[in-house]
Amino acid sequence: MPETVHGNLKSNQARVGDKQSMATSTRSPIDVVIVGGGMITHDQILPSIYHLQRLGLVGAIRVVALNSAPLRTLAEAPRLAEAFPGQRFEALPSLDAPAEQMFPDLYQEAIAALPPDQLVVVAVPDHLHYPVIRHALACGQHVLAVKPLVLKYAQAVEIEKTAHERGLFVGVEYHKRFDRRSLEARRQYRAGRLGEFRCGEAKLVEPYYYRHSNFQNWFTKENSDPFTYIGCHYVDLVYFITDLRPVEVSVRGVEGKFPNGNTGYLWASGQVVWENGAILSVTNGLGYPDEGPGTNDQGLCLFCEGDDRGGYLHHDDQYRGCSYGYVDQKSGAAFRYVSPDYFRLVPWEGEGLKPVGYGYDSIEALVAAAQRVNAAGEGFSGEQALARRREMLEAIDRRGLLATPANSAINELVTEAARLSIAHHGRHVAIQYAPSPMVRWREG
Ligand SMILES: NC(=O)c1ccc[n+]([C@@H]2O[C@H](COP(=O)([O-])OP(=O)(O)OC[C@H]3O[C@@H](n4cnc5c(N)ncnc54)[C@H](O)[C@@H]3O)[C@@H](O)[C@H]2O)c1
C-alpha cells in the first residue's frame, strides 16, 4: 500500500477540498449507463438510480446487458413498476432483440455515446469489471463499480492512476460501510472505546437458490469463489472499522456442481491475519436454506483487548429484530426475518414507493461524489479545472467513507491473495506493503 494511501486514512488534518467535499453542493443531473442487468441491478442499483432520477439528480438512464432477456425481466418487474410508476430505462440491446443473440461489446458503444463526465455503473460479473471500468475512464466517465472493484492489485493501481490523471471519480459499492452499525463501530473503535481487535469471525452465506440463477454461468472456479464474492464485504468492514491492514490470507474452497454441470467453489473458509497479528476467520457459501427465515446468514464478531480488560463488537446482520409470518407465499416462505436496514421500498409522500436503507444510501453517496467532482471544476477550464477536480478526489480519498481505488486497495490485495490461495488448497499467501505492495507465498 503506498504510504500516501494508508496515511490518508490515519490523518485527521483538513486540507484544501475537504470542506467542499463535505458540503452539499448544487448537483446537476448526471446521465447514467448501467452495464449489467442482473440481480444486483434489479434489487438495489436500478431502484436507487430511479429514485435519484425523480429527485432530479439523475438524467437519462440506459441499461446494457449481454442480451435482451435480463432487460426484459427488469422492464417488466412488478416491484419496480409499483415503486416508480411512469419511469423507464432505455434498454441496450432493445427489448425486442432475440433473447439468444449476444452483444458482448455493446457496452462500449453505449459508454462512448455519453457526453463527458457522466456516470457508468459497472454491475457485470466480477471478472468483467476491469475492461468495462477501463473503457469508461478512457471515454471520460466517472465510475461506480459493484464490489470487488477488480481481481488484481495492479489493475486497481492502474485505475486509480488513470482516474486521477483525468480528474474522474471511481467508487466501489461496499454498501455495508453505510450500515449505521458500521459507521457507529468505526467511530467507537477509532475513539479507542472497544480496545484493539485480536481475534474474530465473520460469515456471509447466500441462499442455495443462487446456484440456479445466472451465477451458474460465471461463478466457476476460474472466475470467482464465495470468499472473493462476499467474504470481501467483511474484510473491507474490518479495515473500515479498525484501520488495520491485512498481511496474510489463506482460503480453502469446497467444490461442487451447479445445476448446469459447471464446477465452482460453493463454500469457502478463509483466514485473514492483520498487521497487529489479529486473526479473522471468514465463512462463506451459496447454501443458506431457501425457506429459512434469513434470507441469508451473516454477521461479524470481533474480540478486542483494552487496558487489562476485554472489548467486544458483535453485529448480527441476519436477524435485525423484525420478523413476519405471512399468510401467503409471495416471499418464498411463510416466515421471514425482515431487514429494514439494507434495502426496502416504503411508502412516502410522493408517488409510488421510495428506497430506504444502506443499499440506497451507498448509491446516493457515490453518485453525489461524482457530481461533487464535476461541481469542483465548474467555472474553470483546462489545467485549473483539472487541479480543482483532483483536489476534490483527494479529499474524498482522505475522508475514507467512500471506498475508492486509492483508499481501499487492500481489498484488491486480499482478493488477489485469496484467488491464489484457493487455487492451491489454502496455501498461505503474504501481503507485503514495502517497498511496494504485492502478494507472495508466505515463507516457512
Ligand atoms: N452484495 C453485493 O455487493 C453484491 C450482491 C450481488 C452482486 N454483486 C456483484 O454484482 C456483479 C453482478 O452480479 P449479479 O448478481 O447482478 O450477477 P447476474 O449474473 O445476475 O447478472 C450479470 C449481468 O451482467 C450482464 N453481462 C455479462 N456480460 C456482459 C457484457 N459483456 N456486457 C453487458 N452486460 C453483461 C448479464 O447480461 C447480466 O445481466 C458481480 O460483480 C457481483 O459480485 C454484489
Image (cartoon, helix red, strand yellow):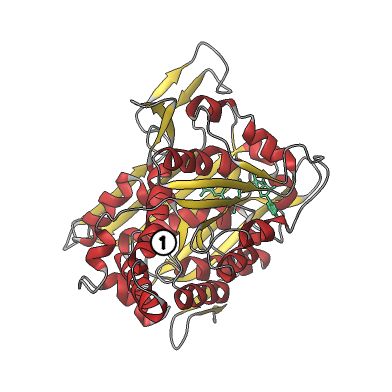
Image height check: is 261 above or below 414? above
Residue that appears at 44% across and 25% down: 352
Residue that appears at 50% across and 41% down: 44
199 or 385, which lies in front?
Answer: 385
433 or 213, which lies in front?
Answer: 213
Where does the image place residue 157, in percent across and percent down from the top left? 51, 76
Where does the image place residue 146, in percent across and percent down from the top left? 53, 54
Q: Can residue 279 be seen from the camera position used here?
A: yes
In the visual, does 376 lie left or right of 153? left
- Mark 1: give few (<14), some (14-19) or many (20+) Cα within 10 Å: many
Quadrant in the rendering for residue 125: bottom right
In the visual, does 252 lie left or right of 435? right
Image quadrant holding the N terminus, namely bottom left
Image height check: is 372 above or below 344? below
Residue that appears at 35% across and 66% down: 378
Residue type beneath disc 1: Ala
Q: Which residue is mark 1?
A: 403
Residue that appears at 68% across and 61% down: 108
Where does the image place residue 50, in percent across and percent down from the top left? 48, 39
202 or 240, which lies in front?
Answer: 240
Image height check: is 374 above or below 286? below
